[in-house]
Amino acid sequence: MKKTRWLYLSIVVAFTSLGFVSTCEKLYPSKTPPSLDTEPFFKVGKNAKSLNQYLLSQKNRQTDVALVKVGQEIIYEYYERKELENKRMLAWSIGKSVFNLMIGRLVDKNIINMDMEVCPLLKNSTFAKSAKNSKICKNDLLKLKHLASFSSAIDWRENYEEDGNPGQSSVQTMLFADGVEDGVIKHVLKHDYLPNKGPGDLMSYSSGDSILLSGAIQSGFKKEYDQLLRDFNGKLETEINFGRSVWNEKAEQSVLVSSSFLHIKPMDLLKIGNLILNQGKSNDQQIVSKQWLNKLFTPYKSQENMVVPSPATIGLGWYVNKSVDANNIAKPWPFLPAGAVAALGHWGQILLVVPSWDLVAVRFGFDLDKKAGSMRAGEFGWAIGRQIGKIPLTDVEPIFSKSSMDSAKNIFDRKHFSNFKSRAPIALGAVGSGVASYLGCACHFIAEMPFDYCAARVNKIDPVLSIKKGPWPNTVTGKVTKFMLPIDSMVAAFDKKTDSSRDHCIMEGGGF
């Protein structure tokens, strides 16, 4: 079996440097995918020239939903199709920020503090054996604050589909390959620290840090952790839904995939922004303290040898519009007020809050063009500022460069993650089928969109990806249809709960 597995891997490696499409698409042209043609729906703002021009006229970026609220009035509300108005949509890494906001309730109640050591929290959990054998837990230096601020110094590769072989990506293999079989926490615990680095030595954006934060708090405070989501939803009158990773047959024994699988209605995400705008209050209730918000939005202060891989300024999981003189980082959005904060997700998901403008804005995107990159918070804020008269229409559009961000990240990766490439690559078939099955399941069952629409969305990500209805009720099979491999599919099963905030898709099978 091992010889067969490595034979498959050797075949696949020939394709990996070109991503999912490349050679496969040329050899095996795809069938015409289902149509995504639809009639856009404006609830408010059809004549908002500046916003419409920026959000809806870019061929290489697709805005699915955009909401803009100034004061108590929603001045702009757009849906790529009317059915999206009340659907739970995938917000990707906005989940990191929302989860860090939520755990403030546990901090405020003195249930946890961010100086708690991580590995001791894992000792009495399902992860105990993995933690005991993990190089990450060879000492007790790693603390919750390091995970919340992406400063664990764990040798973690946070690269996505545009960077080539997903088998060399810690996050893609966690979410869609190894982590499906082993569980996401075990996958993170298989990593080590960077050579000659330790917690607090450098900051590097990491889904692994967010996942381990979630698992550590759950392991040490299971009762309070389980109540947190229900309590937060109830008090905020939202339906925040995190996907769950199941590491055995009992779905109850699962961990919130806080890094990536947040499903939330657009208006509920707007409520999260309102909570920040109102300094932690909702309906005259203090949901999280002002002190916790201050911590979230203060750039993380590091050791003297802190290295920051990109021009972004990050607090505890939130992007903040502040300069950091010690690290020679300028204010990332110079045309927005200094108090602006944002949560960002893959493919252009944005939650932007600008307190001095009394503004909350939400964008759900489907930005797949690798050259243009996803829309950034600064771009979104600039377009809104022009629309509401905060930025003069005569101002020249800033240059929103993707290359400068990527260049800094690539230099950082080459310097600090040079040993990563020696790890055995995972077949694109395994990762690709995991991507297809999860997104198909989330679209059809969690967002409750028509199956043909979901199939077209998956196929638009890459022509080699496809879904079909699975072998059992409430399942979706994802496939990399152009790989001539015997095993290139994965099934995602929808697990519906009485409490809809606990609905999730479970990936099963696939890989090797």
Image (cartoon, rainbow, N blue to C red):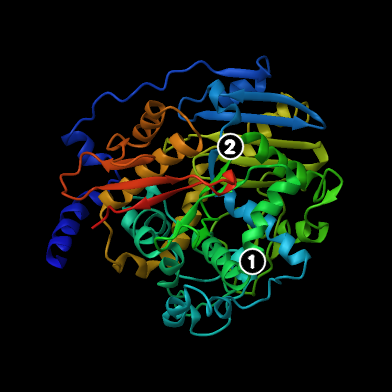
> 10 Å neighbourhood of mark 2: few (<14), some, or many (≥20)?
few
Q: Amino acid at mark 1?
A: Lys
Residue 399 disc label: 2
Is 82 situated left or right of 235 in this image? left
Is 312 situated left or right of 70 in this image? left
Residue 337 visible in the picture: no
- Asked whether the beta carbons under mark 1 and mark 2 sit within 8 Å of each other, the answer is no
Which is more N-terminal, label 2 or label 1? 1
- CA distance separating discs 1 and 2: 48 Å
Quadrant of the rendered image containing residue 52: top right
Is 440 situated left or right of 262 in this image? left
- From the image, tell me which residue sits under label 1: 223
Q: Secondary structure at mark 1?
A: helix
Q: Nearer the viewer, mark 1 or mark 2?
A: 1
Task: Tell which of 471 and 349 is nearer to you.
Answer: 471
> 10 Å neighbourhood of mark 1: few (<14), some, or many (≥20)?
few
Where 493 falls versus 223 (above or below)? above
Residue 236 percent location from the top left of the image: 74, 45
At horizontal 56% and vertical 40% (from top left) the residue drawn is 349
Where 414 falls versus 435 (above or below)? below
Q: Amino acid at mark 2?
A: Ile
Quadrant location of the N terminus in the rendered image: bottom left
